[in-house]
Image: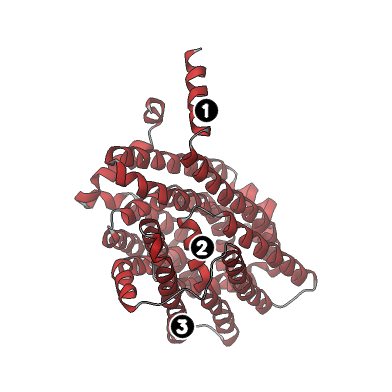
Amino acid sequence: MLIPMSISTKLNSLKNHSGFIRYFKNTSWLLGEKVIRLTVSLFVGIWVARYLGPERFGLFSYAQSFVGLFVVIATLGLDAIVVRELVKNESKKDALLGTAFVLQLAGAFIVLLFLAIAINFTSNDTSTNTLVFIIASATIFQSFNVIDYYFQSKVLSKYVVYANIITLLISSIIKIALIINEAPLVTFAYVILFDSIVLSLGFLYFYLHEHLSFRTLKFEASLALSLLKDSWPLILSGVVISIYMKIDQVMIKEMLGPGAVGQYAAAARLSEAWYFIPVVICSSLFPALINIKKKSKELYYARLQKLYDLMVWLGLSVALPVAFLSDWIIGFLYGEQYSQAGSVLIIHIWAGVFVFLGVACGKYLTAENFTKKYFHRTLFGAILNVVLNYVLIPKYGISGAAIATLTGQFAANYAYDFFDPDLHSQLRMKTKSFFPIHLLRT
């Protein structure tokens, strides 16, 4: 009877703990929204893939991946930095949000300029470049994501959830209507732009709903320089992350053609659909980790260890069943026309374990202001990924790209810590998370 009583006591203490309830509700809102998004997006996304077929779906995925190589520049790595500063000093809210908004708006136009230069080095035709620029235009409206940063800092993610679900439902209805009416490929690119506009309006509505004014936001040049000083390694890291998350589809298109991209993208989207889990959990708990760090280093590292444990075993719980059922999953969802995707999924799904770890470790690096290390580890993984793609795609086809992705994620989010003395403690914590005996003792 001792164990049940102990568990009951702990549960009761958690129920009465206002801080726990606050973060639990916040995380529940985010997880709930992502589960709905995963379900609806998979259903509609698979329907779109079936309708377009591997060739046109490959072109669509290629255009999104090509934009994805540059779009991270628009955020300027400010998300975690702004959240951190808002938690530390809420009185600077208007200056922080206003400055971040102007910086990200400028970043969006820089992205469009870079894309205009980059397309000259591809084999794209006019219709493919049209897809690229329509999708890229959505980055202009993503500047309103600064409102999301404010809600993160206040642990009020339910408003972000409302805006995302409304956008998702409208977008899904439009896509289904396009499929039924046999719309051309370019209309699906316009839906991405439309989604970004609707989401920005949703963020603005709920910000005003909280009796806050967008007019009070202000730009401060000195603050902009301070934010960029902290975030520039994250900008570079974001670019590098985009490279080893998106470069595979760009290289497959150049080496094997759009049909192969369609096969690979079908598997990659199923594999990456789970990546929202660590982002939601870590984003929701990040303010709590910062607050705990102020009070107790020992408690801070104990909570960080638990976070690593959770990330590893959530990742494994997804990877194991999907790997064993990969061919059946692809056949059931996409049909025979995507038969090559099964061999990709069985490899690609394991990269998620290290993505989960990497998201948690990224929050640690931000909290410790180790932004340069964040860049170094992602650069390490990206270089390895690009080299392996170049070597393995001609030899093993789209399965070679999956191997390169898995190796790059392992290198960046785990192996890199071995080479950096400051991160040896993180390597020990991550390694410990893989052993069930540690969890039993905990």
- In the image, 334 versus 208, the foreground residue is 208
Q: Nearer the viewer, mark 1 or mark 2?
A: 1
Q: Give the image location of residue 391, x and y in percent.
A: 38, 65
What's the distance in space between the residues labelled 2 and 3, CA to CA? 21 Å
Amino acid identity at mark 3: Phe
Query: Can you identify the residue that label 3 sits on?
Result: 109
Circles 1, 2 touching at the beta carbon (< 8 Å): no
| Circle 2 SS class | helix
Amino acid identity at mark 2: Asp
Q: Residues within 10 Å of mark 1 (few under 14, many from 20)?
A: few
| Circle 1 SS class | helix
User: 80 above or below 109?
Assistant: above
Q: Give the image location of residue 273, x and y in percent.
A: 56, 55
| Sequence-first tag of 1 and 2 | 1
Query: Can you identify the residue that label 2 sits on?
Result: 148
Q: Give the image location of residue 163, x and y in percent.
A: 62, 62
For residue 12, which numbered disc appears in the image?
1
Please state if 409 lies on the left or on the right of 262 as rendered. left
Res. 257 in view: no
Circles 2, 3 touching at the beta carbon (< 8 Å): no
Q: Residues within 10 Å of mark 2 (few under 14, many from 20)?
A: many
Res. 385 in view: yes
- In the image, 132 versus 290, the foreground residue is 290
Please state if 44 lies on the left or on the right of 408 as rendered. right
Q: Nearer the viewer, mark 1 or mark 3?
A: 1
For residue 227, which numbered disc appears in the image?
none
